[in-house]
Image: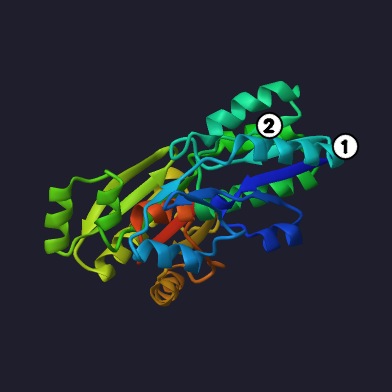
Amino acid sequence: MSRVAILTDSNSGISQEEAKEKGLYVLPTPFYINDEIFYEGVDLTVEEFFAKQAAGADMKTSMPVVGDLIDRWESLLEEYDEIVYIPLSSGLSGSCNTAMMMAEDYDGKVQVVNNQRISVTMKISVYDAKRLADAGKSAAEIKEILEDTKFESTIYIMVDTLEYLKKGGRITPAAAAIGSMLKIKPVLQIRGEKLDSFAKARTIKQAKQIMMDAIAKDMAEEWNDPTGENTIIAMAHTQNEEEILKFKEEALERWPNHDIFVDPLSLVVSTHIGPGALAITCTKKLDI
């Protein structure tokens, strides 16, 4: 049986400490803040990121440096026979396509998974990959399974401020001004490679209801699991811990038999949506 390493990037929300504990590997995502480079989880904490964002720093997300990625692959192949690399969704970054081209030089030993996920849903994929590797699947088999099930997962995100969507050019200044005046809390959806507008709410309470109804509909209609027993529900937030824990309690009232885990949203997503966001996700369980 070949030894398969599971490598992801820090957009999965898996810290260096957690990776070490679970036998995984995480490539830190670089950020340019006021033209200075920082690496998530290495020399940039979540708290430092949001402090710099609140201070109005100029922030740009960046793909993992090609040299860093090649170095990591080379060092892992000294210890393992194959690598499964799960980067950020190709719909949100060019890093996946770049990695796929680079992997062509490795004779199938490096399999790059484009299952188009981010944050907590990406984390679930990484843990599924590890379980598949432990069950004896090859890197190519793991890639195929994860890509075949990529649409069996959805994220709904309530954005608290329109400022950062405006900054990133995702909405016009006029739409942002009207939305702020009307106190609109947009709900966004990520499924596959698209980040789309899903609904508009006037209050946090209404946004939470919209998001819970949306995942209930996905479970019932998309993967025929109305009770959610074969679905993983997870949550994420940007600097909004108190509110996400309240939201978790509300979700547990609706789905009492779930072990709902909560993580901070990826800093790449946080760059575009700012603090105060709440997210809920549903992912069909992978039968291993």
For marks 2 and 1 on the same chain, the one whose residue lies earlier in the sequence: 1
Instruction: Report x, y in % for residue 6.
Output: 71, 45
Instruction: Report x, y in % for residue 1.
Output: 88, 37
**Residue sitting at x 16%, y 57%:** 179
The residue lying furthest to the front in this view is 35
Relative placement, left or right, of 181 versus 219 is: left
**Residue sitting at x 76%, y 29%:** 109
Relative placement, left or right, of 184 versus 47 is: left
- Report the Cα–Cα distance between label 2 and label 1: 17 Å
Q: Give the quarter of the image for residue 281.
A: bottom left
Name the foreground residue: 208 vs 278: 278
Q: Is residue 16 visible?
A: yes
Could you say whether the residue bearing mark 2 is in a helix, strand or loop?
strand
Q: Amino acid at mark 1?
A: Met
Q: Which residue is mark 2?
A: 111
**Residue sitting at x 67%, y 22%:** 104
Q: Is residue 236 above or below residue 66?
A: below
Q: Which residue is mark 1?
A: 1
Could you say whether the residue bearing mark 1 is in a helix, strand or loop?
loop
Q: Is residue 286 visible?
A: no
Q: Give the quarter of the image for residue 182.
A: bottom left
Q: Amino acid at mark 2?
A: Gln
